[in-house]
Amino acid sequence: MLLCCCVPLYWLAQWNTGYSNYMLAE
């Protein structure tokens, strides 16, 4: 149960970080 909650949050945080870096690079 906990893994199901943590994995999407971790993935979302990683995606959000990459997206922010991409926007800053433009």
Image (cartoon, rainbow, N blue to C red):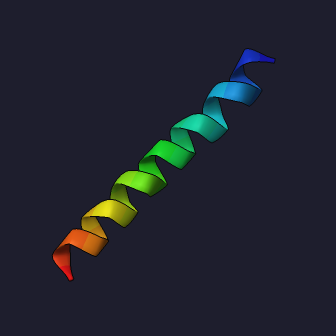
Q: Residue furthest top?
A: 2
Residue displayed at 18% across by 75% down? 25
Q: In the image, is 24 to the left or to the right of 2?
A: left
Residue displayed at 73% across by 16% down? 2
Residue 1: percent from the left, percent from the top? 81, 18
Residue 26, quarter of picture: bottom left
Q: Residue furthest right?
A: 1
Residue displayed at 75% across by 29% down? 4
Closer to the camera in the image, 26 or 8: 26
Query: What is the total number of numbered labels drawn onto the structure image?
Result: 0
Q: Residue furthest bottom?
A: 26
Residue 21: percent from the left, percent from the top? 26, 63
Height in image: 24 above or below 26?
A: above
Residue 6: percent from the left, percent from the top? 63, 27
Q: In the image, is 7 to the left or to the right of 10?
A: right
Residue 12: percent from the left, percent from the top? 55, 47
Q: In the image, is 18 to the left or to the right of 11?
A: left
Residue 16, quarter of picture: bottom left
Height in image: 6 above or below 24?
A: above
